Image: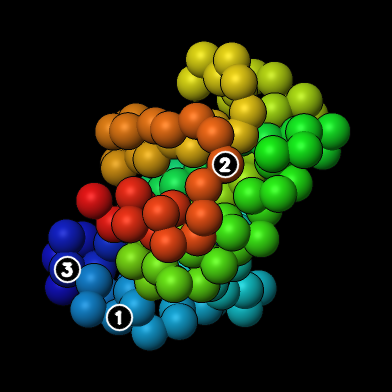
Amino acid sequence: MSTAASPLVRCAGCGATNRVPAERLADDPHCGRCGAELLPGHPVELGDADFERVVAASPVPVVVDFWAPWCGPCRQMAPQFAQAAAQMKGRALFVKVNSDDNPQTASRYGIRSIPTLVKLRGGREVDRVSGAMPAAQVAAWAAR
């Protein structure tokens, strides 16, 4: 079976590389090493140490929420982001990056205001939007 038919997916929990047939990406694939969901229906916390290895290998778009705990709009949008992640389960990976705790990743993407959502495909930025949004709008933006 070719790599294109079975993309490699990095586990956000343990970092293991897992081969998942493309047609099974929406079937709740789990890590062969630690058993964690590979494309969960909830946001995954990533930081400077693991961000690149997880998003670069993702066979689905990655939606990144850059946020900080002191930010009111970020806290307001958190449940909306989680709802959008549940709606997009298996079709996109939703991750959160605390921009205060992870300055290298925030700087790499030029984050100047929060909340900022960045959409990545193949590890490359394809779109971004700033400001709080309802879940339906986040999911529609992620699906584009």
Q: Is residue 38 visible?
A: no
Foreground: disc 1 or disc 2: 2
Q: CA distance from mark 2 to mark 3?
A: 36 Å
Q: Disc 1 vs disc 3: Cβ atoms closer than 8 Å?
A: no
Residue 31 against residue 56 in the figure, above or below: below
Amino acid at the residue labelled 3: Ala
Quadrant of the image occupied by residue 22: bottom left
Q: Which residue is mark 3?
A: 5
Q: Which residue is mark 2?
A: 132
**In percent of the image, x 36 and y 39: which residue is there?**
120
Seen in the image, is 128 located left or right of residue 135?
Answer: left
Q: Secondary structure at mark 1?
A: helix
Foreground: disc 1 or disc 3: 1
**In percent of the image, x 70 and y 28: which residue is there?**
99
Seen in the image, is 49 located left or right of residue 28?
Answer: right
Q: Which mark is residue 94?
A: none
Residue placed most toward the observer, 68 or 105: 68
Residue placed most toward the observer, 34 or 59: 59
Q: Secondary structure at mark 2?
A: loop
The answer to which of marks 2 and 3 sits earlier in the sequence is 3
Q: Which residue is mark 1?
A: 24
